[in-house]
Image: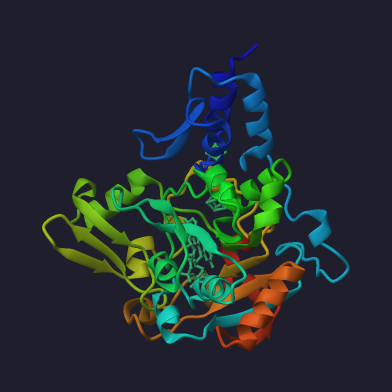
Amino acid sequence: MPTPAERLNRICEEGLCIGCGLCQAVAGPDKIEVVVTPEGALRPLAGEALDHETVDLIYALCPGTHLEGLPAREDDESSIEDLVWGPHRSVAKAHAGDPEVRFLGAAGGVLTALAIHLLESGAVDFVLHAAPAKDMPSFGVRQISRSRTDVLAGAGSRYGPTATLIDIDTVLALGQPFAFIGTPCDITALRNLARHDLRVDALCRMMMTPVCGGFMETPALARKTESFGVPFDRLTALSYRGRGCPGPTRMERDDGLAVEKSYLDFWGEDDSAWSLPWRCKICADGIGEAADIAVSDVWPGGAPTREEAENHTLDPGSNGVVVRTARGQALFDAAVAAGALVQEADCSAEDMSLWQPHQVR
Ligand SMILES: Cc1cc2nc3c(=O)[nH]c(=O)nc-3n(C[C@H](O)[C@H](O)[C@H](O)COP(=O)(O)OP(=O)(O)OC[C@H]3O[C@@H](n4cnc5c(N)ncnc54)[C@H](O)[C@@H]3O)c2cc1C
Ligand code: SF4
Ligand code: SF4
């Protein structure tokens, strides 16, 4: 019979852990601590107090071991079923109504605009999402945003390890309505938790996600920054994208030097150059099937043109928006009516497939 620690470790050994942090939040740091490994990944470390009962619960909650998609109640006769894009109510091309939000957002700023709209309309007290980690510039860190300024500080994509749910128990204990933005695996983790903790559905008023092709593993990222003249141990800040669409990837060195590379120079011309965690390579849900709203880029073929990548204001930015639930649709419609979002076009799953060929593959 394997020990509790061996059973927990198996999740990592099978390449199923993405470092979301939920297991630490649920078990408590005396039983499980999510730590940075020598390879620069976030992984759970078993404490002496870990028992089989807790590991049973983690197997039910971990997005690497349990993935269900939308709760059945959200998927009714108004849902369109699509083999690739999953259940949804509508697809649109849209961008933030506020030019500053559109500019700072990773693409068209839709996630940031929706988060600000939820806060300013009083629908939620805060937004749980991610911001750059100050001590480890390539990582993300979970952020609680209670104002437009806070939300804007988290705008942009974090293409590095991010334990968004590391203290979700403390967040829920606040007893305040909130919105959540996380990767599709974070959304799955929160949906899993909702089946065990009634506070999730009582308090979490909206779950929103970027469509996700994975992030860069730390060793590969370190090789990249080094090749651009910024050794990883001298990296003090990293902005992956935003400030235009996609905007520059900006690396700052400890002596004040800032190096900017275009999205295509940083990531390569196509997805064959991506270096992903194993979990991302076998991801069963990069499209955010469990989210109320999933938001993507809209470059035909999945990448910006060389001109768009190098001229940071050539494309002001737009998003594909897949609305999956009734409450997601109500939010999208209200945000358009209030001017927080500008809807450019009604679209369909076919448009998503044109913009996201890697997800279709
Ligand atoms: C890891 C990753 C992979 C992606 N892969 C694809 C892809 O394959 N295809 C595609 O079309 N788009 C992909 N995107 C999404 C794209 O980069 C944009 O984030 C998305 O289109 C939303 O744009 P926006 O302008 O609305 O974002 P913004 O308005 O800038 O808002 C982004 C929000 O997401 C949150 N966030 C960012 N990174 C993380 C993270 N790692 N964990 C939790 N929350 C986070 C931020 O806190 C912010 O609230 C990916 C994003 C990420 C983070
Ligand atoms: S719950 Fe999250 S951090 Fe814990 S093992 Fe699963 S994926 Fe990894
Ligand atoms: S590709 Fe899948 S496993 Fe990887 S971060 Fe995105 S949703 Fe999570």
- Residue 361 vs 335, above or below: the answer is above
From the top left corner, tell me how far across and down residue 137 is, in percent. 30, 53
Q: Residue furthest right?
A: 77
From the top left corner, tell me how far across and down residue 131 is, in percent. 40, 59
| Closer to us: 123 or 229 | 123
Q: What residue sits 61% from the left and 60% below the top?
A: 177
Where residue 195 sits, quadrant-wise, is top right
User: Position of 352 compared to 70: left or right?
Assistant: left
- Residue 152 vs 96, above or below: the answer is above
- Residue 322 vs 271, above or below: the answer is below
| Image quarter hosting the N terminus | top right
From the top left corner, tell me how far across and down residue 151 is, in percent. 44, 68
- Residue 81 vs 321, above or below: the answer is above
Q: Residue furthest left?
A: 255
Q: Residue furthest front?
A: 175
User: Position of 146 compared to 66: left or right?
Assistant: left
| Image quarter hosting the C terminus | bottom right
